[in-house]
Amino acid sequence: MFERRITVEDVLETVRAGETIEEYPSDMPLPSRLLLGWIGSRPLHVVAAHDPQTGNRIIITAYEPEFGSMGARFSKEEVDEVRNLPEWRDATR
């Protein structure tokens, strides 16, 4: 995570307030879901599972998605809007 410039706080905020964009009910040993959060203007994907017996959430991975690989998860307008933000342009130089 730290190599990707993702903090524990970023992940926790995405788990707390992010939008579920895909569910994986057949994942083993626990069902998981893909969450989308926004850290400022940066999109963040977190894959997390929930253990109903213990109440624990297990973070599987966290990463900043690339717009070219997101397919239908974002509209073209959303992608264009983020790409036009000064923070995004500065980060991709």
Image (tube, helix red, strand yellow):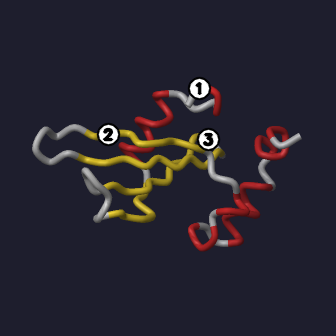
Q: Which residue carries the number 3 mark?
A: 40
**Disc assigned to residue 29:** none
Residue in the image at 43% along x and 49% along y:
47
Disc with the residue nearer the chain's start (3 vs 1): 1
How many numbered circles does the render carry? 3
* Amino acid on which disc 1 is placed: Phe
**Disc assigned to residue 2:** 1
Answer yes or no: do the residues labelled 2 and 3 have beta carbons within 8 Å? no
Disc with the residue nearer the chain's start (1 vs 2): 1
Residue in the image at 77% along x and 45% along y:
88
* Amino acid on which disc 2 is placed: Ile
* Amino acid on which disc 3 is placed: Gly
* Alpha carbon distance from label 3 to label 1: 17 Å
Residue in the image at 70% along x and 59% along y:
67
**Left or right placement of residue 3 versus residue 49 in this view:** right
Assign the N terminus to one quadrant of the image. top right
Could you say which is closer to the camera, residue 39 or residue 64? Answer: 64
Name the residue at the front extreme. 28
For marks 2 and 3, give the one nearer the viewer: 2
Q: Which residue carries the number 2 mark?
A: 58
x, y percentage for residue 3? 64, 28
- SS at badge 3: loop
x, y percentage for residue 54? 13, 38
Crowd around label 3: few <14 · some 14–19 · many ≥20 (10 Å): few
- SS at badge 2: strand
Answer yes or no: do the residues labelled 3 and 1 have beta carbons within 8 Å? no
Could you say which is closer to the camera, residue 20 or residue 41? Answer: 20
Crowd around label 2: few <14 · some 14–19 · many ≥20 (10 Å): few
Q: Is residue 55 above or below residue 22?
A: above
Crowd around label 1: few <14 · some 14–19 · many ≥20 (10 Å): few
* Alpha carbon distance from label 1 to label 2: 18 Å
